[in-house]
Amino acid sequence: MFFAVLTAGILTSCKSDDPIEEEPGEAKLATFGFYQEDNEGLFFQDYEVAVTGNITIALPKEVNKSALVARFTTTAAEAVVEVATVEQKSGVTVNDFTVPVDYIVTNGTNNTKYTVTVTNSPDYVWTLAGTSEFTVSEFAMKVNPATNIPYVVFNYSLGASELRKAGVFKFESSSWSAVGVDTITSAGVNNVALTFDNSGKPYVAFCDYGNETSRTPTAKSFNGTSWANVGAPGITDVRVQYNSLVFDKNNQLYLFAMNDVAGGALARRALNMNTFNGTTWTANQPLSVRTLPNAYRMRSVQKNGNIYLAINDYANNNGTVSVYILENGSWSVLAEGMRHEEATESNYYDLAMDVDSKGNVYAMSIEKVSDEYKLVIHKYTASSKKWSIYGSPIPLGTNNRYYDLAVSPFDVPYVIYRTSEDKCAFTFIDSETKTWAEPYLFSANTTSDPFIDFDSIGKGYVVIQNTDNKLVIYKYDAPK
């Protein structure tokens, strides 16, 4: 009897000292999403959804969904996540989401299945964002890459050219506001240009009636409080036109222009290149690799650390287009004297150019093809180093100037142009039909140069000078 009681006591004592086995936690997903950091170059913001069951996430239709990396967390640290028996690592494992993907979450006892479906976001639409109170004679627009805010530089519409002083405004919180003060010059200006340094600091240039040699260019920058000259005003030795402003990868500023008169270090209508070293300008430089004598309008872009420069070749075989690249400190020719093979002339009154993330160049001009003026986009494919015509030439009717082109972060070129009815039209190559989409017509009428640009996550902006000389801004975004 005593032995039995003792044995029972010992067994009871041993049981009380054993560790208590915890019940396995729930095998569930807590969070799920696709993050820009894990999918570099595919999209430009994060997409996360609340997990309450099966998961549906909408991504822009331009995104290649065949190789995406998902990031997730589970409600229990010991849970294992699998797709088709392959263990998943959050932020690492690649899957094909062109079809629904089943995620199995298990902790050895409990399993939960989540079907993840990736759909296309609704197509972006244009909406009227605002109209300026001020009036302008001419302007230029770019989106600040550091803040995603659209900026414009312009000269006020105030009668005589020498009275049209410069202003810089930005569009933020649904309204236009001055960057610094309303007027940043004491004299009239024209041929305005705008760019940003690598930190998002705005720089402008224009031909300045107040300089000792009238209409030589002045450059200014904004330090967060006020505008100051970049080097001395009157950068070139003679007056110029068609300013284009850009930074290289080392934050050195370049100003390109066309000499408007003879008598300078360079001939009339020659390309005039000027560089700023942080203190002074090295002015009136020729582009050593350019063999054609006459320039006209020009556009410059920095992409992937390279500068791309497109130029209208004035009076060269009834007009052509040339494109150059500054790469690793050296200039070279991508194309010189270029035109559609069936074109008999190229109109030098306007020019547009942009570059995608792969270094492919899109240079757009108006050319006379089959006795009709059309917008022609010349595409340079960096991988093959060859030029081709992008899409088909776009008929323009009676108008033969005023257009722009911009490549979105998804590497899609978008085109705007003035129609015969003085509307601004917007189009692009449809990814399904591989042809130009039906043009969208903005509400404002225009008789001047429109501008288009995109922010870093793919939202677009178009600014149009309407017939009252006010600036009308439209935004391209997902429908609300």
Image (cartoon, helix red, strand yellow):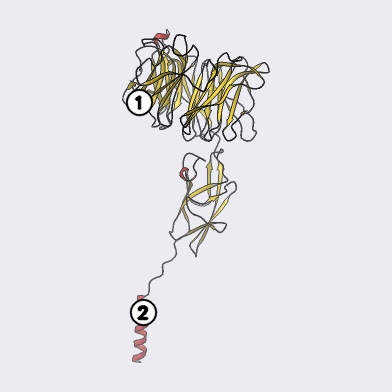
**Position of the N terminus by quadrant:** bottom left
Determine which quarter of the picture holds residue 348. Answer: top right
Q: Residue at coordinates 36% horizontally, 86% vertically from top-left? A: 7
Q: Nearer the viewer, residue 350 or 75?
A: 350
Q: From the viewer's side, name the closer residue of 387 and 268.
A: 268
Extreme residue toward the right, this view:
370
Task: Between label 1 and label 2, give the one nearer the viewer.
Answer: 1
Rendered image: mark on residue 266 = none
Q: Residue 249 or 114: which is nearer the viewer? A: 249
| Callout 1 amino acid | Gly
Point 64% across, 33% down: residue: 434
SS type, badge 2: helix
**Numbered label tally:** 2
The residue sitting at the bottom extreme is 1
Label 2 Cα neighbours within 10 Å, binned few <14 / some 14-19 / many ≥20: few
Q: Position of residue 418 (x, y in %)?
A: 56, 19
Helix, strand or loop at mark 1: loop
Whichever of labels 1 and 2 marks the residue nearer the N terminus, that label is 2
Horizontal side of 225 relative to 152 (left or right) equals: left
Q: Residue furthest top?
A: 160
Name the residue nearer the viewer: 281 or 399.
281
In percent of width and height, residue 415 lies at 56, 26
Image disc number at residue 278:
1
Furthest residue in direction left, as rendered: 225
Kind of residue sitting beneath label 2: Cys
> Mark 1 and mark 2: span between their CA atoms?
81 Å
The residue under the point 37% across, 78% down is: 15
Tag 1: Cα neighbours inside 10 Å, few (<14), some, or many (≥20)? few
Please give the name of the residue rendered at 60% of the width and 48% of the height, measured from the top-left corner: 99
Q: What residue is disc 2 on?
A: 14
**Residue 453, above or below 31:** above
Image position, residue 470 (x, y; %): 45, 17
